[in-house]
Image (cartoon, rainbow, N blue to C red):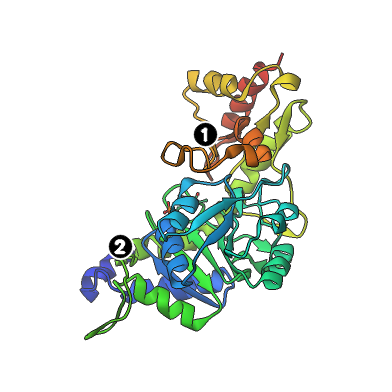
C-alpha cells in the first residue's frame, strides 16, 4: 500500500514512470547485467527482442519449454528448428546443435529451463563460429548465476518472466537484458508502438510497457527476494532428503558452477523401476488436493496448433522426459510437514 501511494502522488500510471525507472535500475544491479529494460510480460520480451534482432529464416530452439518460447519465434515469421535436450539437466543438447545449422539459420533460442543454466560457453562458441544471434529464454532463471556471473550476461540478450508464479514477480511482467545499445533502443521503441519521438513512428511495434502498479509490486518483492530464494532452497533440501536415491526417481541435478534460484523441483519417474507412472503419482497427489504439474508436457513441437508442422520423433530425449516428468509444489512458505506428506504420498506409490 505504501509503495502504490507514490503512484497517485506522481500522477504517472504508466509510460516509463518513476517506479519503472527505479525498478529497472534495481533489477539491473540485482541481476548484475549491463543493460536492462522492462516489459509487460516475459512473452512480449521474447517477441520484441526477436523482432528487434531483425532475423530471417530458421531459429534453433528447444521443445522442452513453455509454449511461449516457440510462439515468440513463430509470431515473428521465423521457423523454429527443434534441438533435443540433455537428459540430465533438460537444457538444449549442445552436442546436437551444429548438425541442425543450415544456411538459413540466424539464431539460437535456448531456455534455462527450471533455472538450470544452459551450456553457455559451448553455445557461445557455436554462435560465434556460424555468426548466429543468441537469445536466452531466462524466464525461469531470475537471479541464477554461472561462475559468479548473472545469467543475463550470456548471449546477445536474455528474457526474464515476472509472472505471478515466478521466483520474482510483478504480477505480470518481464525484462530483457542485453549488451548492444542499438538493440536496446529498438526494443524500447517496439514496446511503445515503434514510436521514436512525437512525430516519428520508426517501427511496427506493439504495446508491451510495464505499468507503474506492476513496477511497484516488483519494488516490494525485490526487498524480500533473497529471503524467498533461501526459503525455496530449504524446501528443495527437504524434498531431496525424502526422494534422493529412490530407484526410479530422477531428481533435478545440482549443476557445477551454477547458483540456482530453486524455482522448480522436477522429478522424472521411470515407471519400470518405480512401479507407478508419473500420471499415477499425480493422481494419488490430486486425491489429497496436491497438484503437481506436467512441466513440460506436451512438448512445444507436438501441441495441437503445431500438429503436422514439426516432428517430435526428432527430439526423442525431450519426448521421453516429457512423458515422465512432473514438477512438485514449491513456494517459499511451503512447510516441512507438507513436503513430508507430499513425499510420503509419492513413496506410497512405489511398488
Ligand atoms: C520458459 C518460459 N518462457 C516464457 C514464458 C512467458 O513468460 P510470461 O508468462 O511472463 O509471459 C514463461 C512463463 O510463463 C516460461 O516458463
Nearest the viewer among 121 and 7 is 121
Any atom of ligand 1 within 8 Å of the CB at mark 1? no
Q: Is residue 154 above or below residue 233?
A: below
2 or 1: tag closer to the N-terminus? 2
Q: Residue 261, located in which quarter of the rendered image?
A: bottom right
Name the element at disc 1: loop
Q: Is residue 105 above or below residue 260?
A: below
Res. 120 in view: yes
Q: Residue 268, located in which quarter of the rendered image?
A: top right
- Image quadrant for the N terminus? bottom left
323 sits left or right of 182 in the view: right
- Image quadrant for the C terminus? top right
- Residue 53 pos. (x, y %): 48, 72
Res. 169 in view: no
For residue 213, the mark is: 2
93 sits left or right of 200 in the view: right
Nearest the viewer among 164 and 82 is 82
Amino acid at each position: 500500500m505504501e509503495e502504490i501511494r507514490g503512484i497517485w502522488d506522481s500522477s504517472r500510471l504508466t509510460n516509463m514512470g518513476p517506479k519503472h525507472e527505479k525498478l529497472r535500475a534495481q533489477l539491473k544491479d540485482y541481476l548484475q547485467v549491463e543493460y536492462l529494460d522492462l516489459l509487460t510480460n516475459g512473452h512480449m520480451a521474447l517477441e520484441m527482442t526477436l523482432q528487434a534482432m531483425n532475423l530471417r529464416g530458421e531459429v534453433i530452439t528447444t521443445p522442452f519449454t513453455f509454449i511461449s518460447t516457440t510462439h515468440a519465434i513463430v509470431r515473428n515469421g521465423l521457423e523454429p528448428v527443434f534441438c533435443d535436450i540433455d537428459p540430465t539437466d533438460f537444457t538444449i543438447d549442445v552436442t546436437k546443435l551444429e548438425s541442425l545449422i543450415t544456411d538459413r539459420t540466424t539464431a539460437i533460442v535456448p531456455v534455462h529451463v527450471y533455472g538450470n543454466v544452459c551450456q553457455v560457453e559451448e553455445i557461445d562458441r557455436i554462435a560465434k563460429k556460424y555468426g548466429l544471434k543468441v537469445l536466452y529464454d531466462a524466464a525461469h532463471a531470475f537471479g541464477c548465476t554461472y561462475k559468479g556471473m548473472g545469467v543475463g550476461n550470456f548471449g546477445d540478450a536474455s528474457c526474464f518472466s515476472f509472472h505471478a508464479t515466478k521466483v520474482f514477480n510483478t504480477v505480470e511482467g518481464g525484462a530483457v537484458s542485453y549488451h548492444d545499445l542499438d538493440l536496446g533502443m529498438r526494443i524500447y521503441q517496439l514496446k511503445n508502438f515503434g514510436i521514436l519521438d512525437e512525430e516519428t513512428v520508426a517501427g511496427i511495434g506493439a504495446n508491451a510497457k510495464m505499468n507503474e502498479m506492476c513496477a511497484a509490486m516488483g519494488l516490494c518483492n525485490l526487498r524480500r527476494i533473497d529471503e524467498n530464494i533461501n526459503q525455496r532452497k530449504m524446501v528443495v533440501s527437504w524434498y531431496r532428503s525424502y526422494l534422493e536415491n529412490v530407484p526410479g526417481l530422477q531428481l533435478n541435478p545440482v549443476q557445477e558452477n551454477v547458483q540456482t534460484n530453486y524455482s522448480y523441483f522436477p522429478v522424472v519417474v521411470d515407471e519400470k523401476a518405480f512401479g507407478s507412472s508419473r500420471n499415477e503419482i499425480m493422481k494419488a497427489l490430486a486425491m489429497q488436493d496436491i497438484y503437481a504439474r506436467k512441466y513440460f508436457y506436451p512438448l512445444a513441437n507436438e501441441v495441437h496448433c503445431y500438429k503436422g508442422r514439426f516432428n517430435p520423433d526428432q527430439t526423442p530425449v525431450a519426448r521421453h522426459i516429457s512423458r515422465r516428468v512432473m514438477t512438485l509444489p514449491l513456494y517459499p512458505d511451503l512447510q516441512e510437514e507438507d513436503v513430508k506428506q507430499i513425499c510420503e504420498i509419492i513413496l506410497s506409490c512405489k511398488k
